[in-house]
């Protein structure tokens, strides 16, 4: 490789090799970040500017010229937030907030839902519209690039940083916080590279105060950061990528070629994979941010220890769950009452179901369902609050499903999880076993909850409804128990890795905390030796090219 090619690999974006935590290039990049950071960390504005520039470079290496979109969102929300804070009249404040929300949701919808809207219009009116990437066209004209204008690529992390910037303007509007001192600080908050592309979603009220604090990193926090990074690499590469490449991806790609037992094990494997993949990213993000002196919030809390669906969502992707609660569920009325937004979203979601179904009788059924709901509220005022609370909850979960993508699968996945929460709310009132919390009862509740969550995951993972239906059909009708010994023998390494993943997840907090603290308090030479061994073994487990993190697609 020539020197020019080497420089090009460093500074040019490659769609085939985006910058992710698991690539060696990232750790070289981070070493450079730390080296420069040691020179600027005492001066707040310079520190923010330094990390802003490098974060934008990181995003460019992860998503190409979409970093211009990130810059645009930064400017929009910084100046609308400033305008909301300075506005004298309530009408001006509301208009500026509406402008910010509209621009953010428009951009998010354009990149995530253009194909969906185009398909719906074509189905309804018999047209032959084709999605067109105007931003790619503009880039081609401006820079001489050669992007395909017929394809709309989803910018990495757009859902995450859009929710972050929206929370900033919403909190200023609610007078929960004041604007940042300058656009450099705000740009740094939005683009901070450890959590930029896959979370956790960081609230401005939690992160921005840290910008104006002196750098501090205790010995314990340094050890914790290294431990979190190592844990994240083990989760992502040694567990998640291994079972995905060697088993899970094969089944979901061609479920009709495999038995029901293999499909069932693939569902279990994917439940583990999506957890270790996403929580592994979060662990690395928390560790990297902590080495720079910034504390990110916890995003996972052993979710497969949950004893019901509601508890699961208080443990899984906590930053998104709390965002949806604070900025969607509560504004809709929460468990108090209905708002205009409740009924608007209720009608909107029923409309989306009707459009996706593209069936006259489904549309009639949804209309009848809506009328029954309204009649129940009018005729039985005593149950009005319960009905409205559950409608608000279902709207939140369904929109949470749509946040992941515009398809039947994501709507079904979100709806099933919402239904699981609603059903449990009624079940716990009549269940004769709810009061028991002994070991057997706890194991039963955890198993039941995990089984339900795993069942919903087939819709989350499958590329389309037909694939999900095929897998479930084969589990039900073609389980083929006679081939279990051969399958277990053929994939024994995968089962051992899965067993290791589940066992370590279900170990007690005290046990895991004890070993974590032993590493943190160990001598530095011991930490270096352990780190070297873990990194060597983790990268030895790689059996294909680096796998992107699952939540990059959202």
Image (cartoon, rainbow, N blue to C red):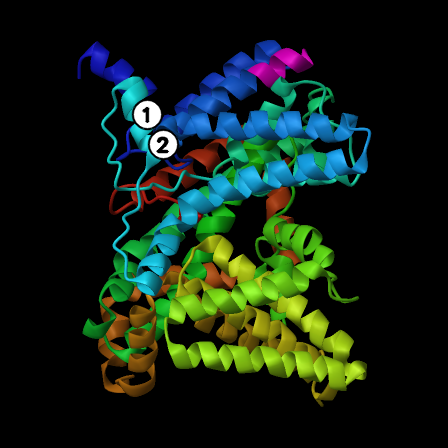
Say left or right for 41 vs 125. right
Percent x, y of residue 167: 66, 41
Alpha-carbon neighbours of circle 2 within 10 Å: few (<14), some, or many (≥20)? some
Q: Secondary structure at mark 1?
A: helix
Q: Is residue 202 visible?
A: no
Q: Are marks 1 and 2 in contact (CB under 8 Å)?
A: yes
The CA distance from mark 1 to mark 2 is 6 Å
Q: Residue at x 50, y 18 (%)?
A: 53
Question: For residue 537: magenta?
Answer: no
| Above or below 21: residue 180 | above
In this view of the protein, which residue sits in the foreground, 159 or 512?
159
Residue 4 vs 330, above or below: the answer is above
Residue placed under numbered mark 2 in the picture: 135
Picture disc at residue 28:
none
Decide which of 39, 396 is in the foreground and name it. Answer: 396
Q: Position of residue 108 (x, y in %)?
A: 48, 43
Task: Tell me: 355 left or right of 340.
Answer: left
Percent coordinates x, y for residue 102 in the rendering: 57, 41
Prevailing SS of the magenta stretch: helix
- Give above or below for 186 relative to 441: above
Out of 106 and 176, give the one closest to the viewer: 106
SS of the residue under disc 2: helix
Q: Nearer the viewer, residue 307 or 178?
A: 178
Circle on res. 139: 1
User: Residue 47 lies in magenta, yes or no?
Assistant: yes
Q: Residue at x 82, y 29 (%)?
A: 88
At x 25%, y 54%, the residue is 128
Q: Position of residue 535 (x, y in %)?
A: 40, 37
| Stretch in magenta | 43-49
């Amino acid at each position: 490789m020539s020197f020019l090619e080497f420089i090009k690999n460093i500074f040019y974006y490659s769609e085939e090799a985006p910058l992710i935590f698991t690539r060696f290039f990232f750790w070289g990049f981070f070493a450079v970040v730390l080296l420069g950071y040691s020179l600027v960390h005492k001066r707040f504005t310079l520190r923010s500017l330094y990390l802003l520039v490098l974060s934008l470079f990181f995003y460019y290496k992860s998503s190409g010229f979409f970093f211009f979109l990130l810059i645009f969102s930064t400017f929009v929300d910084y100046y609308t937030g400033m305008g909301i804070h300075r506005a004298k009249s309530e009408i001006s404040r509301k208009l500026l907030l509406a402008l910010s929300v509209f621009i953010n949701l428009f951009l998010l919808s354009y990149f995530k839902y253009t194909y969906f809207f185009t398909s719906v219009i074509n189905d309804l009116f018999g047209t032959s519209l084709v999605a067109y990437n105007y931003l790619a066209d503009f880039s081609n004209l401006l820079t001489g690039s050669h992007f395909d204008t017929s394809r709309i690529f989803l910018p990495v992390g757009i859902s995450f940083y859009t929710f972050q910037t929206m929370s900033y303007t919403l909190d200023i509007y609610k007078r929960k916080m004041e604007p940042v001192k300058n656009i450099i600080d705000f740009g740094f908050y939005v683009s901070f590279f450890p959590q930029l592309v896959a979370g956790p979603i960081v609230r401005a009220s939690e992160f921005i105060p840290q910008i104006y604090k002196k750098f501090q990193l205790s010995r314990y926090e340094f050890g914790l950061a290294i431990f979190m990074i190592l844990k994240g690499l083990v989760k992502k590469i040694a567990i998640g990528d291994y079972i995905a490449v060697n088993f899970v991806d094969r089944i979901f790609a061609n479920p009709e070629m495999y038995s029901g037992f293999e499909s069932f094990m693939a569902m279990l494997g994917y439940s583990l994979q999506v957890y270790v993949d996403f929580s592994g990213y979060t662990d690395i993000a928390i560790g990297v941010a902590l080495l720079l002196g910034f504390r990110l919030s916890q995003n996972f809390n052993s979710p497969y220890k949950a004893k019901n669906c509601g508890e699961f969502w208080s443990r899984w992707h906590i930053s998104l769950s709390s965002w949806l609660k604070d900025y969607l569920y509560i504004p809709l009325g929460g468990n108090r009452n209905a708002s205009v937004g409740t009924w608007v979203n209720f009608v909107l979601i029923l409309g989306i179901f009707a459009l996706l179904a593209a069936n006259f009788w489904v549309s009639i059924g949804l209309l009848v369902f809506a009328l029954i709901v309204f009649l129940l509220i009018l005729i039985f005022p005593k149950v009005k609050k319960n009905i409205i609370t559950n409608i608000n909850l279902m709207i939140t979960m369904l929109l949470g499903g749509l946040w992941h993508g515009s398809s039947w699968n994501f709507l079904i996945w979100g709806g099933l999880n919402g239904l699981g929460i609603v059903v449990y709310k009624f079940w716990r009132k009549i269940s004769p076993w709810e009061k028991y919390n002994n070991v057997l009862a706890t194991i039963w509740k955890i198993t039941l909850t995990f089984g339900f969550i795993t069942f919903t995951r087939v819709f989350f993972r499958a590329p389309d409804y037909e694939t999900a239906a095929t897998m479930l059909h084969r589990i039900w009708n073609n389980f083929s128990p006679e081939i279990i010994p051969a399958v277990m023998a053929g994939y024994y390494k995968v089962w051992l890795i899965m067993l290791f993943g589940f066992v370590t997840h279900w170990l007690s907090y005290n046990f895991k905390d004890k070993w974590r603290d032993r590493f943190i308090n160990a001598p530095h030479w011991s930490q270096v030796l352990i780190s070297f061994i873990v990194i060597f073994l983790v990268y030895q487990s790689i059996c294909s090219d680096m796998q992107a993190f699952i939540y990059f697609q959202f």
